[in-house]
Structures are given as structure tokens and as C-alpha cells.
Amino acid sequence: MDSKDLPGKSQVVRNRPNFGQLLAATIALGIGEAALAPVVYSLIPEIVPPQRRALANGIYAVAAILGAGLGISLSGALIDLSDGLRALLPADMHAFEPWRLAFLTVALPGPVVALLILLIRLRPEAEAKEQTHRANVAGLADFLRQNYATVASVFVALGMANLGIAAIGAWSPVIATRIFGATPQAVGQGIGAAYMIGTVVGALVGGAGMRWLHPRLGHATSLRVISIGLALTAIVSAMLTLSTSALHVYVLFGLQVAFLISATVVIPTMLQDMSPEPLRTRVIALATMVGVSLASMSPVMVGLVSDLLNRPSDGLIFAVASVAATAMALGALLARSAEGRFVRTVAGVAAADLRSTEAAGQLQVPAVPSAS
């Protein structure tokens, strides 16, 4: 499933008459979205030259995150707008709830996006190189067996970050509305603005950190940037317990996003570097599966901690802060400890890819006829 499926799934979500069907359609939407990252980050090295790969990864990541922030900011206004245009719709749609109309509106750009995707062209590659890669690069199971320590520490570190992100992203709007009485429109605008500002600041800080540290750390730079970003996010997450208004929640959310983006904007390039070229999609997909699995634990963990605290007035704030801060801190420690293993894995992958490329080049050299 690719990005062309997503608008259709949004329309399916809009049409569901009961919770069970809504849940099923939402799961289908999630499947489509989950496929995007492995596919896109595997395609980028085939679309852009190697020297521009990190820039392309960063642009895509920031664009996707900014789009999410824009969606949050406009969500309340979109619902109001959809409700206001009800009279212009066909008669059989007049009874639709505003959220259904909002889903339908989100699906409208789908055909245009699908046509734009058809314009993408890959960089031409020699068939001999592709065949040589398939013949000489170990399969996924062999790669995981040879690099299990690197894969486990890196993937779990990223998974801990996802768990913390899920706690922050899912519960910050709830805290603002339930505890501090903010309206849904105000929450959408406040969280959305914090999201977008934090994304821009985080991308700039992360890029500057990479340029500053890379001459000294080499391939370990990405994990060092991730560990620093997650550690700072853990500190800000703990500060959530000091919030006394919705504005404080928005400001802290923006700081969390900034530090997270500064860390996570380098993740795609890091995963590409540690993955043999023919295995990139599968390795990135595996990392995504680990991250999603750990992130899915966030609601349960926040609920359990909140129940254990038994503080009706601010128990949710302390639960979210403790889950997010702990997850981020663990992720930072794992990322920092994996640097040496990661550098060795990257060196091994680069050497294997170089051997395959050289072998492919030899296969393409035409035979020179001997002089008679």
C-alpha cells in the first residue's frame, strides 16, 4: 500500500456508521501510513545523488512533520468550515456530522497527489549492479544475526523515543482541555503553532549539531545527536509537572518538539547508512515496527501510572511526564551506548556495498578484441 491509498482510506473512515467499522477503517489508514516511511526512505537514495541524500531526508522529514502540525492547527477551523458549507452539499450529505465532512475534505486532494507521485523518476542504475547486489549481499536474517547488538540497541532506542512521543503527542491536548479548560479550537491552534515552530527550530538545531560534531565523531555523530536530543526532551517532559495553564503546556510541547526534531531528523540517514542497499526497505520497516509496537504501549502505561498515583486533579500530568521522561532517558542512554557498535556496522555495510559495486562494474566492462 502506498500514499495513493491514504485519501481513499480517509473517505472510508468518513463513511463508517458505527464504532467497529470506524476502528477497522482507521486501522486500514494506519497500515497505509506505516508503509510510507520505509518506502520513501528507501527510494530517496535512488532518486537523489549520494551527496544530497541527507538534505533530501531532512526536507522530507521536516515537510511531513510541518504538514502534521498544520493539520493540527487547522483541524478546529476545518470542522467549523465543513459545517458551514453543509448547505452547499448534496441533500443526502446534509445530515453528516462535522467530523465526517472533515474526513471527506481531507480526502479531496487525493487524485492530485496521486498524479504528482506518477511524475517521480528514479536514477538509472545498471542491471548488472542490481544482480550483483542480490547475489552478494546477505539476506535480512543474516544481516540481523551479524549485527544483532547494533540493531537491538538502535531500534529499541528509537522505540523508546516513539513511546515518549506518543505520550506527549496524545495527552498534551487532553491535559490542556481536561485540566486547564481550553477549548478544542484553542488547543488546535496552540498545539499546532508549537508543533510547527518547534519543528523549524529543531531542524535548524539538529543540522547545526551534525555539522559541528561530525568532524570529531564521524559516523557516530547521528547517535550522539539523538542521545542529546532525547536527554533534553526528558528534562522538558519532567517540567510538565510544573504547568499551571494551557499556555505552559503549549510552550513545553514546543520545546519537546524542538529537541525531538533535532534528534530524529537524522534518523533516516542513520538507518540508510546501517542498511545494505538491497535491504533498506526491510531494515527501515523493521525499525518502524519496533517503534510502533513500543509507541502503542504508551496509552496503557499512562493509564496505569495515573491509576497508581490516584491524584484526580493532576494525576494525568504526572503520569504523562513520568512515562515520557523515562522513555526519553532510556532512549538517550541506549543511543549513547550503541555508538561504537553502530560505527562498526556502518563500516561493514559500506565495504560490502563497495565490493558489490566494483563487481558490477567489472561485469559491465566490454571485452577488448585482441590485435591479430
Image (cartoon, rainbow, N blue to C red):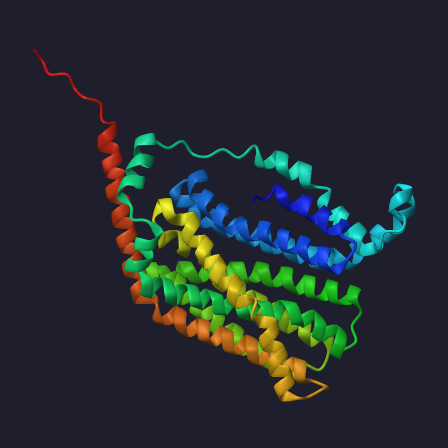
Quadrant where the C terminus is found in the figure: top left
The front one of 355 and 17 is 17
Tell me what residue is drawn at x 30 percent, y 64 percent: 341
Q: Can residue 213 be seen in this view?
A: no
Tell me what residue is drawn at x 24 percent, y 38 percent: 358
Q: Can residue 109 be seen in this view?
A: yes
Quarter residue 252 falls in = bottom right
How many dots with numbers? 0
- Up the image or down, 168 lies above or below 135; here it is below
Quarter residue 255 falls in = bottom right
In the rendered view, does 171 fall on the left or right side of 35?
A: right
Tell me what residue is drawn at x 69 percent, y 84 percent: 314
Residue 94 image position (x, y, % from top left): 90, 48
In the rendered view, does 111 fall on the left or right side of 124?
A: right
- Up the image or down, 161 lies above or below 26; here it is below
The front one of 129 and 260 is 129
Residue 202 image position (x, y, % from top left): 54, 62
Residue 334 image position (x, y, % from top left): 40, 71
Quarter residue 365 falls in = top left
In the rendered view, does 59 fall on the left or right side of 312?
A: left
- Up the image or down, 316 lies above or below 108; here it is below
Tell me what residue is drawn at x 72 percent, y 66 percent: 190
